Image: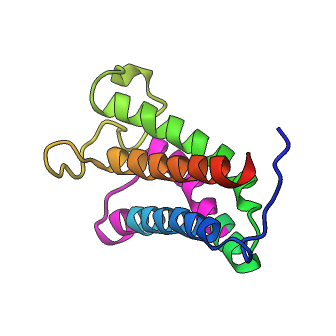
Amino acid sequence: MEVVMINLKENQSAWYLLFMCWVVAFVATAGSLFFSQVMGFPPCELCWYQRIFMYPLVIFFVVSLINLDASAFKYSLPLAILGWLTALYHNLLHYGIVPESATPCREGVSCADIWINWLGFITIPMLSFIAFSLILIILTIFYRRYLK
């Protein structure tokens, strides 16, 4: 797949889409650090993997926005897909669809532990899933409008 890069200086709406991706990634990163460093919730192994996929997105998007080019798309898409798949698996485990015996969390914090439960269904893994979903939706819109 050949991706033709566009100049964000010439296309302000494309810049806004990448800015929205940056906002989502930044809020997700700040939120994960708040939960672990301020609230004292220890992250499980799957949470660490999701962090590994989310944290670089903040840097990729901000560099792309500063340089006014759309190169972040080709670097961020694989991380967003892998993060989304990890978050999906974590939610399936968290809500009991996948048995806890099938988890990579062997030592330390259980991946099925519930630290927050807003409105009866919004948990930390769900927040991660929503963040990766939003980034993928915005990147899909970006691709269809500007790179296809």
Quarter of the rendering occupied by the C terminus: top right
**Nearest the camera: 24 or 105?**
24
Quarter of the rendering occupied by the N terminus: top right
Residue displayed at 74% across by 51% down: 147
52 lies above or below 83: below
Say left or right for 75 vs 96: right
Residue displayed at 72% across by 71% down: 8
**Nearest the camera: 77 or 113?**
77
Whether residue 95 is in magenta: the answer is no
Prevailing secondary structure of the magenta residues: helix
The answer to whether residue 107 is visible is yes
At which x and y percent is residue 143?
Answer: 66, 49
Q: Which residues are magenta?
A: 34-59
The answer to whether residue 106 is visible is no
- Give the quadrant of residue 103: top left
Residue displayed at 51% across by 66% down: 20
